[in-house]
Amino acid sequence: MTTPLLSVKNLNLTIPTGSGTLHAVRGIDFDLHRGETLSIVGESGSGKSLTSLALMGLLGKSIARSADEMRFDGIDLLAANRRVMRDLRGNRIAMIFQEPMTSLNPAYTIGDQLTETLLLHRKVSKSVARARAVELLEKVGITAAESRLSQYPHQLSGGLRQRVMIALALMCEPDLLIADEPTTALDVTIQAQILRLLVDLTREMNMAMILITHDLGVVARVADKVAVMYAGELVETGPAQEVFATPSHPYTRGLLRCIPQPGKTERGAPLGTIPGVVPSLIGEVSGCVFRTRCPHARAECRAEIPQYGTPSHGFRCVYDDGALSEEGEFA
Amino acid sequence: MSNAPDPLLQEIQGPSPRQMLKTRALGHKGLLFGMAVVGLLVLVAILAPVLAPHDPYAQSLMNRMVPPVFMGGTWEHPLGTDHLGRDYLSRLIYGARVSLLIGAVAALISGVIGTAMGVAAGYFGGKVDAVVTFLINVRLAMPVVLVALAVVAILGGSLTVVICVLGLLLWDRFAVVMRASTLQVSRRDYVAAAQVIGASTPRILLTEIMPNIFNNLIVVITLEMAHAILLEAALSFLGLGVQPPTPSWGLMVSEGKNMMLFEPWLVLIPGAVLFVLVLAINLMGDGLRDVTSPEGRS
Amino acid sequence: MLTFILKRLGLAVLVAITVSFISFSLLFLSGDPAAALAGETASGEDIEAIRRLYGFDRPMLVQYGEWLFSALRGDFGESYYFKLPVASLIADRLQVTMLLGLCGILFALLTAVPLGVAAAIRPNSIIDRLALFLSVAGQAMPSFWFGLILIVVLAIQLGWLPPSGASTWRHFVMPTIVLGYYAMPAIMRLTRAGMLDVLESDFIRTARAKGAGETRVLFKHALRNAIIPVVSLAAVQMGFMLGGSIVVESVFALHGAGFLAWESIARNDLPTVQALILVFSMFYIIFTFLADVLNAWLDPRMRSA
């Protein structure tokens, strides 16, 4: 087995607040190889975006990061200084954000913003950078690419801006692309186009991609691997098909019940919901975080939950056989 | 039913808005300092006849320019005497009356004008708004000091004239802020609700709009009061505001200016008092803004 | 953009006309300008003669119309006191005031903008507190008193600068500081608030994700957006400052237009006062108009609108 492109072990993020320390992200482990797409799924506030910002080294000053390992292509991200991180960002690790409407600088043209990335990281002339920008705009499906370079963000629609953001991320042919809810703010028809574009591009450029989303439909279509995140922890990770076929954690099952599945969900049957709210993460967090909402919760759930399953498909739940009865779940 | 607050209910609801306001106010150093100084000076102004050691108008050509006690003077005149031998401390104490009176009344007059214009513009919009916005533009284009000086010069400098001129000139900020606040408030649902149930316009303005823009009004009143006090001092300094022998701090600086070479304290003391008063009022205004709208802090 | 400029220009002209009417009617505030002009000792016949000489006996609107049309041709009448054409009198003195205003606004911008940026980068740091202190103090400082203190310290005690006059650049140092300090607090606060706001925005995160260095993020990406409203404010402040020059010029005995205003007010020289009010208002109107146009040009969203 080859060494992974990105390897994260026991990542923890804490935020000091007035009423105690907020343990926003706890014990995250995952590996990612070239050409793979990992999808991190979870509700809003589960710590998905923070995890991705932690990889980029773009957390706010108030957030503390610790991990046993964070390695990208042999570079220790934990020990990397600002220079090293700056050289990686936009160059070898690129990111696409959730809000295409506000993620571009209103004061500069599309061309200026696209070429800036390349000019920052490569010793190329402006004309070369512009040619690369045109090439990428065409690749992400923008017509009249040449003339778009002199336009300002406000002159483009949301879908176009997100395409520009993708082109921006690809300017330096990164090894890893982090897409944080890239389609959430867009119309449904455009969502599908953007998603297909991302998948095609990762294949074509042999990039690794981390796709952060709360939309399981998106995951099913594009991800090789899935990591299900709940309240700052990965409750289940594994190959996408396996996780969808045999979900082992009650939370994953709950999530899957919330979306209609062709053939499985009966016509007219109510969709599932997960009752309850996410617990507070301020102060010490112990045991299974999902126990407050889990229909199978029992006393052992308060204790430390070991990892079960195979190395490729793991989950954290006291029901270690992964064969919970289908009965009595989230009615 | 008892009026005592139910402890359980209190725990669920948390502190009331009034309690939270009080907590925030007590934690705001600028506000506390400002209120303390302004309160003290208001007290001094009210009690001037009791506090002043001498008659502020009594000249004594034998005792001209006696230095303050910390510069070798005596306790007879703690802050010395001016070029006419009048007790400087007494003049300062009576000067507080002039400054505070002018500041308060001018802010009140301009507050009434500006609030009426701003609220009308914000609530009715359309042509009313266009006219008010235009008038604000015209007012901002006029150089305040120059116009005030000219008018005071034409009408003759007296306390009443200075107050009226400043009151008629300083309504612009009231109009701007009240217009914006009214615009914001009148879009809220409770105003629409009042309109739907058929409340009359004056009733809506008084019971729905005014209470909700009152906090902003108080803030502007304090800041404009400071503005008016500074302007009066400048006018009097230029010799075209309050006329001698009325003790005005601006006038005292102006009178001391000629002796500034040898007796700099004649200028320093009244200017410093003026600075502290305006500073305190501004701190109070800024503090009130912070405390009443914690989300809109700059 | 063109429609915006035309609309804005129309507003400027309307404001200018209204201001001109108000400054003209100041003359009639005293009730009888002829009596005011003639002085307290004049007889009824003298007043009547003056009334006819200056045309005060005609309807006010006719007088206003005449005055406005002469003013448009650059003729503001003759000064009662200096016995010179008001226009040339003002033109002479305006240079000093313009120079002072320019120096003042430059001083304000050069101190307030860097201070505002530094304060926004590290909120609640020492530099933020210093900036806050300077702005709070600046707003409470009576400018005439500040000027006198500078004279006492820098001119008299230390002897570094001349206390008054306008013959060399050293004469302009203290007036510049006093006038500039007047405009500083507002510019500083707006820069700080604007930077804090912009630094929170998504496109700044994008710039960082590109691998841009902190300096580049701050100045190329953040300041470029935060500075747009500061431009308007600077123009407004410049307009206010020219009006405020009257105090500063009298403290430092700088014989500019502000000093002229003071002299002519003290001497009841109404044609000069009227003309000066109009001229100062015009500067304000022109500055704010130019600032709005510049603003629209700086902001791509408005440029293409």
Image (tube, rainbow, N blue to C red):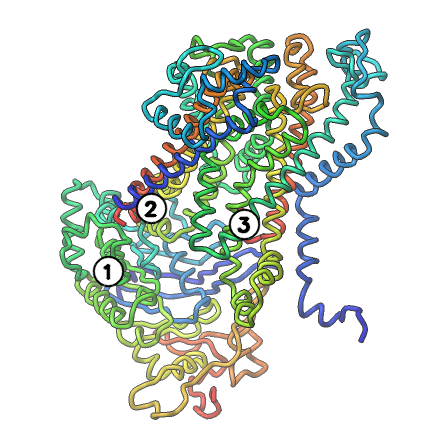
**Are discs 3 and 1 located on one and the same chain?**
no
Q: Seen in the image, is B216 located left or right of residue C75? A: right
What x and y, as percent, mark residue B194?
Answer: 56, 68
What x and y, as percent, mark residue A139?
Answer: 16, 59
Which of the two discs, 2 and 1, labels the residue nearer the N terminus? 2
Q: Is A293 placed above or below C55 here? A: below
Q: Nearer the viewer, mark 3 or mark 2?
A: 3
Q: Nearer the viewer, mark 2 or mark 1?
A: 1
Give whichever of B76, B197 is nearer the camera.
Answer: B197
Other-residue count near label 3 (Cα within 10 Å), few / some / many at <14 / 14–19 / ≥20: many
Q: CA distance from mark 3 to mark 2?
A: 47 Å
Who's the residue at 44% across and 73% down the image?
Answer: A235
Instruction: Give the labeled residue for mark 1.
Output: A160
Q: CA distance from mark 2 to mark 1?
A: 27 Å
Q: Is C189 placed above or below B194 here? A: above
Who's the residue at 59% across and 14% down the image?
Answer: C43
Other-residue count near label 2 (Cα within 10 Å), few / some / many at <14 / 14–19 / ≥20: many
What x and y, as percent, mark residue A45?
Answer: 46, 66
Residue A23 seen in render: yes
Instruction: Give the labeled residue for mark 3.
Output: B178
Q: CA distance from mark 3 to mark 1?
A: 41 Å
**Are discs 3 and 2 located on one and the same chain?**
no
Image quarter for residue A249?
A: bottom left
Who's the residue at 17% across and 55% down the image?
Answer: A136
Other-residue count near label 1 (Cα within 10 Å), few / some / many at <14 / 14–19 / ≥20: many
Q: Seen in the image, is C133 located left or right of residue A331? A: right
- Chain letter belonging to callout 1: A
Residue A89 seen in render: no
Instruction: Give the labeled residue for mark 2.
Output: A86
The amino acid type of the residue labelled 2 equals Arg
- Chain letter belonging to callout 2: A
